[in-house]
Image (cartoon, rainbow, N blue to C red):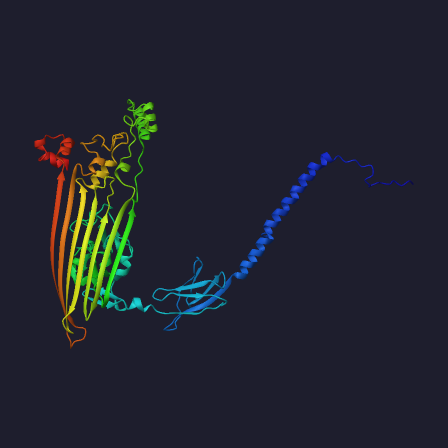
């Protein structure tokens, strides 16, 4: 039987590599993809593994317990934060906490309501126990309540207070705006940004007051209930006349804590105590503030080309003749013919983008041998919001206080304060001027496009051009208010009854309000179309 041999060698084997190479490429990329996916699934590169290892070695786990330094009781809810980062933790019901810090140089900040904040550097410690101290300064702070003062720890009524140091650090023109967001349960609503009209509405726990003469749901400031304002024991005063730098403390009395003032305090009471002199050498203090203001919301208006396009589309849809042709729309768009095809931004031509507000205050105080004095002078001014700079507001205030003890049981004091407010406006109100600017179309002229100067455009409605009526050329409303307040007080402390005292306060207020309203009769004749002899009658009312 003959055996058959099979040769498995490569001898004589011919391979066409041009056909094999594409197959080898496919196999190579498949194997490479499997390796890359395996690397991504298993983790990062060796360098990232080393960085993670280093990071994990730098992390320090810190634990501890927070207690009261006086009683030793645990404090739950204490806030622990790594200074300069967002990393933080809270203590549990037993006062225990755990936090990871980035390194030994990290600083832990421990804070809790009513306690002093502490900062501790971690170093190499893994357990840090902290005993927080009670903030006795806040608890011993005197709070004005009704006709007296109490320590904050003894106040049981709903009373919110703020110190004068916090108010003077706020860049506000008056005290009413300065307390916005600082008094719990007190809502401050700013209704206008017009210079000299910045008095906001203040509501304490909503609208529930017998001071209101109109509907409870009305938004008119004349009908919205206002809290009773008491300044240095004198009710019915205005907060706008007080410079924030002259306030020593401000308290808001709510619910039953304000009952001592009767029904007029149904919407709460705002008690303001002004600063007095302190014993020691004379102290001179000057503060200056300059701020920039801009409208919070500027209406977006359409341009002349888009307005003409939309008007044409409407007229075509209604089967009416078009007012503007395609050529007119193109001229509105490219601005080559400003005389016949203007592109007016009425609001932009009327209102500034930025305006300024300024505040100056200088005080001098001191005292010796029980006699103390305090002198303050302030100046506040708001620039115009119109480009014509036709609205102005300035307020000057002077306040002097002198405390003179007669003997150990009789103390007297004299206070003299003066205020001058100067307001200047166009003869039309801001509502009428700004409201009219939002009703006019951009295809009319606010100013003639001349190179010689600024000439107002044609009258629009009843001869009214809001860019022109915002100036003093048509008229002027000048308001000046002079007010002088003098107060004399005497306090008798009964020597044989500790804590019993009698206080007498006498106040005299002199006020003069001067309003000058001037109207350009020539402008009024043009506006109303009246004859000169008719301007002072019914046509004058139409002009106003």
Left or right side of 56 for 544 = left
Taking depth in this image into account, of 75 and 126 the one nearest to the observer is 126
Q: The C terminus lies in which quarter of the figure?
A: top left
Q: Residue, x 13% and y 58% (percent of image)?
A: 485
Which quadrant of the structure image shows residue 6?
A: top right
Residue 495: percent from left, percent from top: 15, 76
Which quadrant of the structure image shows residue 182?
A: bottom left
Q: In this figure, what is the number of numbered marks? A: 0
Q: Residue, x 45% and y 59% (percent of image)?
A: 87
Residue 72 in the image: above or below residue 20: below
Work out whether residue 77 can be spotted.
Answer: no
Work out whether residue 523 can be spotted.
Answer: yes
Q: The N terminus lies in which quarter of the figure?
A: top right
Residue 252 in the image: above or below residue 383: below
Taking depth in this image into account, of 13 and 497 the one nearest to the observer is 497
Residue 371: percent from left, percent from top: 18, 68
- Name the residue at the right extreme: 1
Residue 113: percent from left, percent from top: 35, 64
Left or right side of 13 for 308 = left
Which quadrant of the structure image shows residue 262?
A: bottom left
């Amino acid at each position: 039987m003959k055996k058959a041999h099979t040769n498995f060698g490569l001898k004589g084997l011919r391979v066409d590599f041009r056909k094999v190479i594409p197959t080898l490429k496919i196999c190579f990329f498949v194997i490479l993809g499997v390796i890359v996916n395996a690397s991504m699934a298993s983790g990062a590169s060796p360098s990232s593994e080393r960085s993670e290892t280093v990071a994990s070695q730098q992390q320090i786990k810190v634990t501890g317990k927070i207690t009261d330094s006086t009683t030793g009781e645990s404090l739950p809810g204490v806030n622990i934060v790594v200074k300069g980062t967002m990393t933080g933790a809270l203590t549990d019901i037993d006062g225990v906490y755990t936090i990871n810090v980035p390194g030994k140089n990290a600083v832990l900040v421990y804070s809790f309501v009513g306690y002093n904040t502490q900062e501790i550097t971690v170093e190499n410690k893994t357990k840090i126990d902290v005993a927080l101290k009670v903030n006795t300064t806040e608890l011993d702070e005197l709070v004005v309540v009704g006709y007296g003062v109490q320590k904050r720890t003894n106040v049981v009524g709903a009373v919110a207070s703020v110190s004068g140091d916090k108010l003077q650090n706020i860049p506000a023109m008056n005290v009413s705006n300065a307390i916005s967001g600082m008094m719990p349960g007190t809502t401050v609503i700013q209704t206008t940004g017009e210079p000299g009209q910045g008095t906001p509405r203040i509501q304490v726990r909503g609208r529930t007051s017998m001071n209101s003469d109109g509907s409870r749901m009305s938004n008119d400031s004349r009908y919205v209930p206002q809290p009773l304002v008491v300044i240095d024991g004198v009710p019915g005063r205005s907060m706008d006349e007080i410079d924030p730098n002259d306030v020593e403390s401000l308290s808001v009395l709510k619910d039953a804590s304000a009952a001592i003032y009767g029904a007029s305090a149904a919407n709460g009471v705002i008690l303001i105590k002004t600063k007095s002199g302190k014993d020691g050498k004379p102290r001179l203090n000057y503060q200056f503030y300059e701020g920039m203001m801009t409208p919070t919301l500027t209406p977006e208006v359409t341009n002349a080309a888009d307005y003409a396009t939309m008007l044409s589309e409407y007229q075509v849809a209604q089967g009416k003749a078009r007012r503007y042709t395609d050529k007119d729309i193109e001229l509105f768009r490219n601005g080559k013919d400003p005389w016949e095809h203007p592109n007016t931004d009425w609001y932009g031509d009327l209102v500034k983008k930025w305006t300024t507000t300024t505040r100056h205050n200088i005080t001098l105080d001191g005292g010796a041998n029980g006699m103390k004095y305090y002198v303050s002078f302030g100046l506040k001014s708001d620039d115009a919001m119109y480009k014509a700079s036709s609205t102005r507001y300035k307020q000057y205030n002077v306040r002097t206080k002198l405390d003179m003890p007669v003997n150990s049981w009789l103390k007297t004091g004299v206070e003299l304060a003066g205020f001058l407010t100067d307001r200047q406006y166009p003869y039309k109100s801001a509502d009428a001027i700004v409201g009219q600017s939002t009703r006019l179309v951009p295809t009319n002229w606010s100013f003639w496009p001349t190179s010689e100067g600024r000439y107002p455009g044609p009258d629009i409605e009843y001869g009214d051009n809001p860019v022109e009526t915002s100036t003093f050329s048509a008229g002027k409303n000048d308001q000046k208010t002079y007010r002088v307040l003098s107060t004399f007080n005497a306090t008798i402390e009964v020597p044989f009854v500790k804590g019993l005292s009698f206080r007498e306060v006498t106040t005299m207020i002199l006020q003069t309000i001067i309003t000058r309203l001037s109207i350009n009769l020539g402008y009024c004749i043009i506006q109303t179309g009246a004859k000169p002899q008719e301007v002072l009658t019914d046509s004058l009312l139409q002009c106003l």
